[in-house]
Image: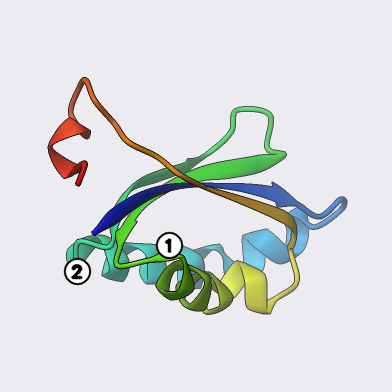
Amino acid sequence: MTVFAVEYVYAADSSAVRDDHRPAHRAWLAGLADEGQLLTSGPYGDGAGALLIFKVQDETQLNDLLKQDPFAVAGTIAGIRTTEWTPVIGLLAAHAS
């Protein structure tokens, strides 16, 4: 399994649409967390985006998951940056391959 850091950049003027889809988005994330695929996530303080940390088989699986996010389906995400990440110290270090 591989750990990935995913950065979302929200589309400008999408806050109302995100508000409408937030319950479904968080339910989707909670399901992934329950399955062990999402390690943690949360919005940036300025509201411009979010950071999500996934543990999945590979980038193909990650991309397939990200397409299912209710925020993505609603078109509220303007950009996504995915980076393979190796946590070495702290609470997430045990998840490194």
Looking at the image, residue 78 sits to the left or right of residue 95; the answer is: right
Q: Along the polypeptide, which appears first: circle 2 or circle 1?
A: 1
Mark 2 to mark 1: distance in Å? 14 Å
Residue type at tag 1? Arg
Q: Which mark is residue 91?
A: none
Looking at the image, which is closer to me, 57 or 14? 57
Instruction: Specify the farthest residue to the right.
Output: 13
Residue for point 71% across, 47% down: 9
Residue for point 81% across, 55% down: 11
Residue for point 53% across, 69% down: 66
How crowded pointer 2 is (Cα within 10 Å; few <14, some 14-19, many 20+) is rated as few
Residue 77's x, y, as percent?
A: 72, 60
Residue type at tag 2? Glu
Q: Secondary structure at mark 1?
A: helix
Looking at the image, which is closer to me, 65 or 26? 65
Q: State whether residue 91 is above or below residue 7.
A: above
Looking at the image, residue 53 sits to the left or right of residue 45; the answer is: left
Instruction: Specify the farthest residue to the top.
Output: 89
Residue 67's x, y, as percent?
A: 57, 76
Image-quadrant location for residue 45: top right
Residue 30's x, y, as percent?
A: 30, 63
The residue that disc 1 covers is 26
How crowded pointer 1 is (Cα within 10 Å; few <14, some 14-19, many 20+) is rated as some
The residue that disc 2 covers is 35
Instruction: Specify the farthest residue to the left.
Output: 94
Residue 6's x, y, as percent?
A: 52, 49
Point out the frontmost of discs 2 and 1.
Answer: 2
Q: Secondary structure at mark 2?
A: loop
- Which quadrant is the N terminus positioned in? bottom left
Image-quadrant location for residue 87: top left
